[in-house]
Amino acid sequence: MSLSPQTPPSVNDFLPLNGTDHVEFYVGNAKQAAHFYKTAFGFQSVAYCGPETGVRDRVSYVLQQNKIRFVLTTPLTSTHEINQHILKHGDGVKILALSVDDAYDAFEQTTKRGAKPYQEPKTMTDEFGEIRTSGIYTYGETVHLFVERKNYNGPFMPGFKKWVTPFNPPTAGLLYVDHCVGNVGWNRMNEVVKWYEDVMGFKNILSFDDNQITTEYSALMSKVMSNGNGYVKFPINEPAEGKKKSQIEEYIDFYEGEGVQHVAIATSDIITTVRDLKSRGVDFLNTPSTYYDDLLERVGPIEEDLAPLRELGILVDRDDEGYLLQLFTKPVEDRPTLFFEIIQRKGAKSFGAGNFKALFESLEREQELRGNL
């Protein structure tokens, strides 16, 4: 099997997507979470909503770094429905918002194909123009929000005000969301894949089974879903039978359901970015030094020196079109759930299949320390 995904055939795309608009996290303390993402990952303050802007039941902080927007939201009362989400799942991703040219049509096209509505189409206006949004549920309680902002030039959305603060640490070279990975339950992957095909018009561009993604102890299966132009990619993971508990099972146990496992963020210089993030306190998975002993034999020539890759634990993989470099953080919550991937593509369009064994063994070492393997 080729490890390089095939370009989806050109078809009439009923749901054209322009990329990821933002990722919204439901968290227990948005003010402190915002400080973490600014300090540790180099995000910048953009916008805020809360009681001071007329929003009485919640606060949201919007952060940005190049084309990446994170929204951190906390409810202000114990009975708020968002608190039920946080109580069950802990801090995590609620909304994967997608940029569209027509949010009303996106809602119509997806709901008539079977999507469960999350938010009926609505138009919001202020002195900066108008934004139109709508939303549907995907796996678990995760939501795709369709955002149409072509007639808006404000800081984020109506209801938000510009968030000005003297504390804006330097950025870390993070550029855009490369892909977002979802973990689903036993025997659910094909069902979710079919949902993305039927409801969103996505194509399955890459598949891995439990013979390819396996270690001595655990295994999983994964399929990569892509929209027509390739701007939005959602790998979907499902646990597979193994001697011990897989990382997917651990996630589902502690997240208490299906959800976003990790957000992969692109950089153009992974060595500089990872070194910077480590200096800010970001914890990454450890890669055994032996991984690098035959690296060039496995992946062929690369432009980078091996010494900094070995020092930082950066993984390398190659497909038919080039190679990629990647590294994964440890979970950023106390529950072993959400984490981030830092990725630099040098032509490769795949997802590091050659690194799965090394990655999973590293994850299993962390699981064993937590007593969850």
Image (cartoon, grey):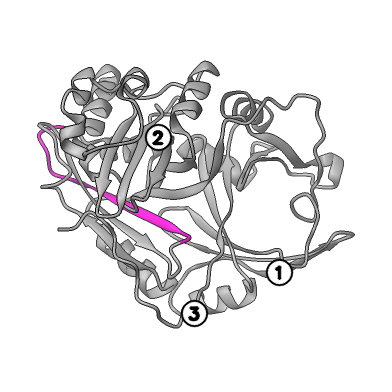
Q: Residue furthest right?
A: 127
Query: Where does label 1 land, which residue?
Result: 122
Left/right of residue 28 with respect to residue 350 in the rendered view: right
Q: In the displayed structure, would residue 28 be above or below residue 195?
A: above
User: Which mark, residue 337?
Assistant: 2
- Residue drawn at point x = 23 percent, y = 57 percent: 207
Q: Secondary structure at mark 2?
A: loop
- 275 left or right of 195 in image: right
Kind of residue at badge 3 = Phe
Q: Nearer the viewer, residue 365 or 272?
A: 272
Residue 233 part of the magenta segment: yes
Q: Quadrant of the N terminus?
A: bottom left
Task: Say which residue appears at 37% left-offset and 32% top-offset.
Answer: 327
Relative side of 219 to 274, left or right: left
Amino acid, disc 2? Thr
Looking at the rendered image, the disc whose residue lies closer to the viewer, 3 or 1, is 3
- State which region is magenta: 231-244
Neighbours of disc 3 within 10 Å: few (<14), some (14-19), many (20+): some
Indicate the position of residue 112 as horizontal and vertical percent values.
48, 80
- Residue at left 57%, top 24%? 40
Residue 315 % position (x, y): 30, 32
The residue carrying mark 3 is 14
Q: Secondary structure at mark 3?
A: loop
The C terminus sits in image quarter: top left
Q: The residue under label 1 is which amino acid type?
A: Lys
The residue carrying pointer 1 sits among few (fewer than 14), some (14 to 19) or many (20 or more) residues within 10 Å by Cα, namely few
